[in-house]
Amino acid sequence: MTEGVLYNRPVIYPYKNNNFYSRTHSQFAATAKEVEVKLASGVDIIYDYMHLVCLHRVPALIKRFTEVLSKDAIAEVDSMLSSIRLQHDCHVKFNYSIQSIHDWKAKHTRLFILNVGLPIMIQYLPTLYSSHFSIYCMFVKILHCPKTLEEIKLADKLIHYYCQTSSTVYDPKIELYSLHAHLHLPAQVL
């Protein structure tokens, strides 16, 4: 089992420390019993797509992006988002700035990561951030509606690369459990 490492205040899960091997059912059951015995609080949950991607990772990325964007770039991004015209049955309006990302609902971040975020942000982000963000967008888009097993395998490769390079692109603080948990999403889609 992959263990976290205390880094200043947060516990991080460095990609290089991951222990990737397929567990058998009996190993999984034994680990679950061990966790049940060691469980000290009721705050441990299994992350779902909405919380893991829409309400945590995307806002965390956008917050980091606003730290490197100029005020003019932020204003232009906000203007583009607020002027987006969507089909009649898509009830999403971007009323809040990307600087107010924590006021966004899951429907905003979902539309952002699946459809509009990459074409808008790639115009303003530094190349390294743009390319890294595009990998994440492709990962989410592929897993959102995979057509073949090969696409799921590609998504698995993308998220491994994304996680492996995240601390280099940003800093080690990005390697929280919520990022590590992304590594398990492709297996859930199978």
Image (cartoon, rainbow, N blue to C red):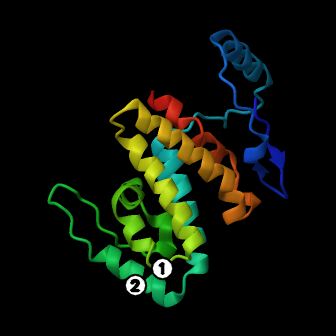
Residue 182 relative to residue 11: left or right? left
The type of residue carrying mark 2 is Glu
Residue 89 place in picture, x, y as percent = 17, 55
**Distance between the alpha carbons at the discs numbered 2 and 1:** 9 Å
| Outermost residue to the front | 150
Q: Dividing the picture into quarters, in which one does residue 167 lie?
A: bottom right
| Outermost residue to the top | 26
State how many labels appear.
2
Q: Residue at x 39, y 49 (%)?
A: 141
Q: Measured along the vertical axis of the image, is residue 50 above or below residue 153?
A: below
| Outermost residue to the bottom | 72
Q: Residue at x 77, y 19 (%)?
A: 34
Q: Residue at x 77, y 53 (%)?
A: 10
- Please tell me which residue lies in front, 118 or 104: 118
Q: Measured along the vertical axis of the image, is residue 148 above or below residue 25?
A: below
The quadrant the N terminus occupies is: top right
Q: Residue at x 73, y 33 (%)?
A: 41
Q: Quick one: SS at disc 2?
A: helix
The quadrant the C terminus occupies is: top left
The residue wearing badge 2 is 76
Residue 169 place in picture, x, y as percent = 67, 65
| Dot 2 crowding, Cα within 10 Å, few <14, some 14–19, many 20+ | some
The answer to whether any part of residue 150 appears in the image is yes
| Dot 1 crowding, Cα within 10 Å, few <14, some 14–19, many 20+ | some
The residue wearing badge 1 is 124
| Outermost residue to the left | 88
Q: Dividing the picture into quarters, in which one does residue 173 lie?
A: bottom right
Which of pointers 2 and 1 lies earlier in the amino acid sequence? 2
- Please tell me which residue lies in front, 160 or 39: 160
The type of residue carrying mark 1 is Tyr
Residue 44 place in picture, x, y as percent = 66, 35
